[in-house]
Image: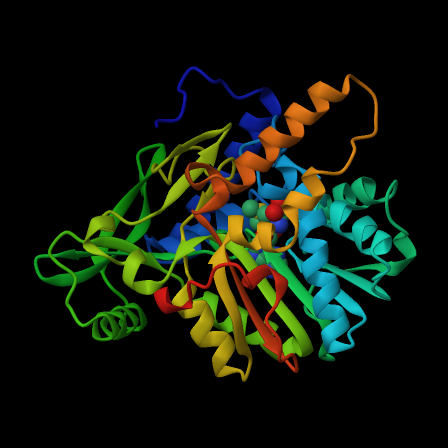
Amino acid sequence: MRPDPSDALDHAAATHAGRVADALRAAIAAAGGALWFDDYMELVLYAPGLGYYSAGARKFGADGDFVTAPEISPLFGRALARQVAEALALAGGDTVLELGPGSGALAAALIPELDALGASPARVLLLEPSPELRERQRARLAPCADLTRIEWLDRLPDTPLAGVIVANEVLDALPCERFVVHDGALHELAVVVQGDGFALEERAARSATRSAVRSLEVELGARFAEGFAHERRARLAPLVATLSRTLARGLLLFIDYGLGQRELYSPTRARGTFLAHHRHRAFDDALFRPGLCDLTAWVDFTAVADAAIGEGLALAGYTTQAHLLLGCGLETLLGEPLAGPGPPAVAEARRSRDAQRLTLPDEMGERFKAIGFVRGIDATLLGFALRDLAHRL
Ligand SMILES: C[S@@+](CC[C@H](N)C(=O)[O-])C[C@H]1O[C@@H](n2cnc3c(N)ncnc32)[C@H](O)[C@@H]1O
């Protein structure tokens, strides 16, 4: 799909786009004329006051650029609450930490449900560097949660915690390097200035990217073919390792779209998985309206597992989002009587449509995976009891 060229920017968005473009030109000049793709992504997503996630764009939900599972329905967070409650009990934990809470939709479903289950954590930590998103989260949570129990962090706590760390659709938003094999050599994409705009240019890959891609080929037992283009994330393993060290006891849970290494880097995905999202359109033009689009790529769950296990965590399971939610009792939630305004039949139909979006294989059910790691827990967890895909890592 292409971005919609007829979809014009209002004055504020156009002014913001101009500021991002100025910052980008300055960064490209400071980098000697070309900015590596991961540095480009870092700037246009996260530069304070400018980046997609650190400035005021609407982003999430029906009137934003994309919809995440917790935005689709509170069923997601309510089902997940059962997994969180189980892990808190097994670990004797008292803390829930959510990384990248976005609009606050997951916490807004999770916290009241934990209270209803009699599993209220003593502390809820929300790691959110963006001041604008913090405000949105506070407003979203005020009607449904005791804010005195919630602490906003801009970095991970120094003291390891006992409880659950959860991140939904955070890893796919980490900056990635983009590589391509051309004339038998490894190249990387960089962003350069071209006229009034920007262009992607292939440059000889950095040595760190070359050795990481070489290790990947060794792991997979084959060289990537001529023209093979893909992504990797140098930032992924350090983040997962740091999160793992932050967990003294309990569960570390990631939900995101992605695959194990063998499937992710298979010849059938020789064009990579990078996508930009803007106003509910997904396209591969990374340079369309820098700072106003979400940029993503699929997650390498093998790399996630290697990093967490390397820090002494045990794999609790790797499964589809559908099986995670069903294992956590989604069907029981669907059987509950519905309260609230409006005809019950309409609410019922809406709830069942939302559950289908979360679980059907051609919606979010299969593409999204859940991977969990534990420390100090030795039991099969609810969310990973129905289907185990660990052999695909
Ligand atoms: C696609 S949004 C998902 C938001 C939310 N979790 C949801 O499911 O609706 C990605 C989020 O990850 C956050 N993020 C990216 N890198 C992060 C990091 N290193 N630490 C914490 N949050 C991060 C972004 O700021 C953004 O809020």
Q: Residue placed at 64% from the left, 70% from the top? A: 251
Place residue 393 in its image quadrant.
Answer: bottom left
Place residue 213 in its image quadrant.
Answer: bottom left
Q: Let me know if residue 115 appears in the view.
A: yes
295 vs 16, left or right, is left
User: Measured along the vertical axis of the image, is residue 357 above or below residue 251?
Assistant: above
Residue 322 x %, y %: 52, 48
Q: Residue placed at 53% from the left, 21% from the top? A: 9
Along the line of sight, the residue nearer the viewer: 257 or 341: 341
Q: Residue placed at 69% from the left, 67% from the top? A: 164
Identify the colour scheme used.
rainbow
265 vs 165, left or right, is left
Along the line of sight, the residue nearer the viewer: 283 or 374: 374
Residue 178 x %, y %: 31, 55
Total marks drawn? 0
Q: Let me know if residue 102 appears in the view.
A: no
User: Measured along the vertical axis of the image, is residue 87 above or below residue 255?
Assistant: below
Placement of the N terminus among the 4 image quadrants = top left
Q: Residue placed at 78% from the left, 77% from the top? A: 92
Residue 177 x %, y %: 35, 58
